[in-house]
Image (tube, rainbow, N blue to C red):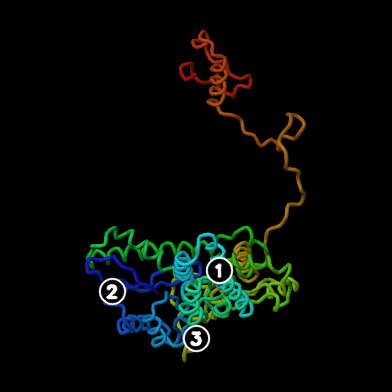
Amino acid sequence: MDSTYKTNKYRQPLFEIVGMTSTELTFVVAFAYMEPEQTGNFCWVLEKLKELFVKKDLCSQVILTDRDLALMKTIEIVFPRSINLLCRFYINKNVGAKCKQHVVNDLQKMIDTLWMEVVWASDEVEYGQRLHQLEQACADYSGFMNYVKDTWLTPHRHRFVGAWINRVLHLGNTTTTVESAHWKLKQMLRNSISDMVKYWEAMNNNLRLQLGNIRASFQKSFYEVEHAHISPFYGYLCGSVSRAALRRIAEELLRVDYVGTNWQICGCTLRTSYGLPCACELGRYALGGISIPIDVVHVHWRKLTMEVELEVGADDGSEVDMTCAMDELWKRFRSLDVIGKRALKSRVCELAYPTMTSLCPPPEKLKTKGGVKKKGKNPAEYDVYRDPSYHEYVDKASQSSQRQSQPSQTSKKLKLSKKQPQFTLQFPNHIH
């Protein structure tokens, strides 16, 4: 959640709320024009947002904002169960600006590096060590160190430091992506003196473009498999999990070589913060020779459709029952001939056994590398070259005549290759 300015002639700030899809694309949830950014106005906006959720008892687990104290207070009131994280990007920019004001140029780069190590500390012990190093480096710059502690670390370290947010299921959202949404919207507006009608048209067009991009990304996750994920190890996940999740799992799989199945070395950050199997889990699956189960992937990464998931309450769950569909499938199977039954069976097996394949290797391995050396040494079926077309013979002869650059040969007929194409003489002379 974030506000942007200079969008309309009324000079009202625009409050924008965006979400993240399983394919790591942003989508706009809501826009709101506001009067001054105060707690009462934020309460009205967030109460309206709460009404948009299809499942009333399921609201956002994590909300990411900048350090707007009025908005942070409102989130605690309207969404008491949600965790409010702060955008690392804004924090690092503000700390970097304060560092340039208080620290000499020669030490700025070193202090920026030490600050980033504090932010990315993986546990509280490492956090204490990194903070101590930063304090020693800033011994002569008490103004900068007081700003860092009083403004960020003491009141808000649990909202952005890795030692605390790695325990939160933030699904990879540690910086607000609202800025990119603001930029796209302002590109469509082109000026800051538009009225409400023009702004509504720009928002509507922006939403349509977002919807098309999101659907395209879902289709890619359904049907396109990257080379790194062809292994049967990902058999249950391909086509059912977003490609963004598969990439993160593939990166985590590289850690298995030195983590093994030891959860203490692993740290399990990918499990706690992304909802994906971490290195020690992947090590157990690899050691057992089994594919990654789809149930160990958080439902967020399995959301590859724009359809609303209906709640199954006191009814009999008929919305998710497959009994009638399976009966119809059996009837269709019995009515087909042998060829049709084989085709239908193969399609069902692809769904039932995703780690298996119906492809078979060729009976003999033929030597296919290398080009054809000379004619006559290899069978005719080895020759993969086509017969050139007539215009190619002419072009070749023309190029060779130009290289000779003899003026007397321009009026002569072009001398073609000895290998004449068949049936050439059957064409009339004027076509020649």
> Residue 317 has which mark?
3
Q: Measured from the top left, where is residue 332 in percent x and y?
A: 55, 71
Residues under numbered marks 3 and 1 in contact, where contact means CB atoms less than 8 Å apart: no
10 Å crowding of disc 1: few (<14), some (14-19), many (20+): few
Q: Nearer the viewer, residue 298 or 82?
A: 82
| Residue type at the position of mark 3 | Gly
- Camera-near label (3 vs 1) is 1
| Residue type at the position of mark 2 | Tyr
Q: Measured from the top left, where is residue 140 in percent x and y?
A: 53, 70
> Residue 33 has which mark?
2
Residues under numbered marks 3 and 2 in contact, where contact means CB atoms less than 8 Å apart: no
Q: CA distance from mark 3 to mark 1?
A: 50 Å
> Residue 168 has which mark?
none
Image point (63%, 19%), residue name = 418
- Camera-near label (2 vs 1) is 1
Figure quadrant of residue 385: top right
**With 364 as the anchor, is 432 left or right in this view?**
left
Residue 111 appears anywhere in the view: yes
